[in-house]
Image (cartoon, rainbow, N blue to C red):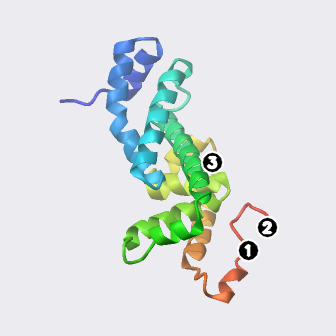
Amino acid sequence: MQRPDLESLARIASGGDIAALNVLLVTVRPEVLRLCTRMVANREDAEEACQDTLLAMALGLPGFQGRSAFRTWLYRLAANRARSTYRRSSSRESTASVDVLSGIADDRRTSVVAMTRLDLLDAIGELKAELAEAVALRDLVGLSYGEIAVLQQMPEGTVKSRIHKARLYLRKRLRLDPADPDAVADRGPPGRRAH
């Protein structure tokens, strides 16, 4: 079966065609879920971000004017919804007891991959929003520099610079050993002032 042309389908759906909107929702859902899964820590949050994205797409489609490619617009919606879901999830988790969290993150019961992913998401969450979005779109979602430039509405050189700054911080942050007193010398993420 041939994949429908998303641009044409989006244009038809934006005109109020409910059948085209339904086909569009079914067509983009797997891709949106894949994007959200790469940007948030767990499956439930990814599902929530995916649903939020699809709802925002359906509601916003009549106002979509085609100044960017439909897929670029959709990625922006997904990135924004995933970031919001991750922040809500992080704030819920931060209210839990430290003892409960340390019991959950027991090395004997938690895979290194899962712990590393959570550490990465936490570190990305410490970055200034535009740095976090750029590096997530490049390294987690797999967009090209050009696609990110269009999505963030800025020159490609600025995107490359932001990704470079974010990667430098993430490399440094993920190598820190909390037991090492010298590791405390870290000044914090770029773009944020120490309090």
Q: Nearer the viewer, mark 3 or mark 1?
A: 1
User: Marks 2 and 1, Cα distance to the nearest angstrom?
Assistant: 7 Å
Horizontal and vertical percent position of residue 158: 64, 54
Horizontal and vertical percent position of residue 32: 41, 40
Amino acid type at image mark 3: Pro
Residue 117 sits above or below residue 57 on the image: below
- What residue is rendered at 45% in x and 50% in y? 143
User: Marks 3 and 2, Cα distance to the nearest angstrom?
Assistant: 29 Å
Horizontal and vertical percent position of residue 174: 55, 74
- The kind of secondary structure element at disc 1 is loop
* Residue placed furthest toward the right: 195
The C terminus, quarter of image: bottom right
Task: Identify the mark at residue 187; answer none if there is no mark.
Answer: 1
Query: In the visual, does 17 lie left or right of 97?
Result: left
First in residue order: circle 3 vs circle 2: 3
Q: Which residue is mark 2?
A: 194
Tags 3 and 1 touching, CB below 8 Å:
no
- What residue is rendered at 48% in x and 52% in y? 40
Horizontal and vertical percent position of residue 58: 47, 23
Query: Exactly how many numbered labels are in the figure?
Result: 3
Task: Identify the mark at residue 155; answer none if there is no mark.
Answer: 3
Query: In the visual, does 134 lie left or right of 111?
Result: right
Q: Nearer the viewer, mark 3 or mark 2?
A: 2
- What residue is rendered at 39% in x and 19% in y? 21
- The kind of secondary structure element at disc 2 is loop
First in residue order: circle 2 vs circle 1: 1
Front in this rendered view, residue 81 or 93: 93
Residue 174 sits above or below residue 9 on the image: below
Tags 2 and 1 touching, CB below 8 Å:
yes
